[in-house]
Amino acid sequence: MNKNIFQKNYSLNLIFGIIDFCLIVFVIVFPVKTIIEDTKTLSSLKENILLIEKQGENLRDFDRNRRIYLQEIEKIDSVFVDAKVPVDFLDLLDKVSQTAAFEIKISPTVSSTSKKDIFPSIVFQITGKGKPENFLKFLEKIENIPYLTEIPDFNLKSVKALGKNTGPSLEVEANFSIRAFSK
């Protein structure tokens, strides 16, 4: 009989122990697991909120600086010659030659564009004649014009010119191409 009571006690303790273990698992482990998952979800949501706030701040900064950016874009745009109507560029070349007292003739040429060219361009053939110092002034002023240009080929030769009262003087004849990058 003692043995039966002991087995019943042992069996009841075992059953209650299993029930307690199951209750501990269901009451503690599963809620902790859901808490951990919710914490991960919450941290990813916080990261998304911080990212969205940072993007909003970047947009506000961009909007504040938009006028500055537009002014810079206009400055960059002004260094390119209008390909359809390059009158402003040609007038500027003519004014530069007049202020430098160097006589030039400008004629358009067919430009050969290659794949390595980044920007489209217009090429003009310039032929000029005048005193060497005037030619140097002309070149200096061309270097400082507000357009993006390059001189791909250049030919210079000295010529003696007969003056009316002063006798022979030294002059230069220049023949070069100027490439003006266009819009």
Image: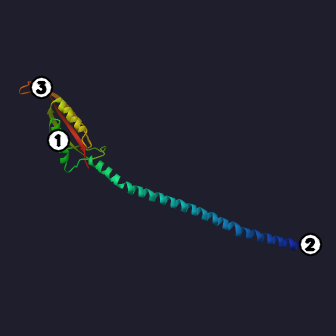
Q: Is residue 151 visible to the viewer in this orientation of the structure?
A: no
Q: Is residue 32 visible to the viewer in this orientation of the structure?
A: yes
The Cα atoms of the two marked residues, 3 and 1, are separated by 25 Å
Q: Is residue 47 left or right of residue 155?
A: right
> In the depicted view, which residue is nearer to us: 109 or 82?
82
Q: Which residue is mark 1?
A: 95
Residue beneath the point at 83% across and 73% down: 12
What amino acid is at disc 1? Lys
- In the rendered image, the residue lying farthest to the left is 164
> In the depicted view, which residue is nearer to us: 8 or 168?
168
Q: Is residue 158 left or right of residue 149?
A: left
Q: Along the polypeptide, which appears first: circle 1 or circle 2? A: 2
Compared to residue 9, the image places residue 42 above or below, namely: above
The Cα atoms of the two marked residues, 3 and 2, are separated by 140 Å
User: Local crowd at mark 1 within 10 Å, few (<14), some, or many (≥20)?
Assistant: few
The Cα atoms of the two marked residues, 1 and 2, are separated by 124 Å
Q: Which residue is mark 2?
A: 3
The percent coordinates of residue 134 (x first, y second) are 17, 32
User: Local crowd at mark 2 within 10 Å, few (<14), some, or many (≥20)?
Assistant: few
What amino acid is at disc 3? Ser
Residue beneath the point at 12% across and 25% down: 169
Helix, strand or loop under label 1: helix
Helix, strand or loop under label 2: helix
- In the rendered image, the residue lying farthest to the front is 64
The N terminus - image quarter? bottom right
Compared to residue 97, the image places residue 133 above or below, namely: above
User: Local crowd at mark 3 within 10 Å, few (<14), some, or many (≥20)?
Assistant: few
Q: Along the polypeptide, which appears first: circle 3 or circle 2? A: 2
Q: Quadrant of residue 137?
A: top left
The percent coordinates of residue 164 (x first, y second) are 5, 27
Q: Along the polypeptide, which appears first: circle 3 or circle 1? A: 1
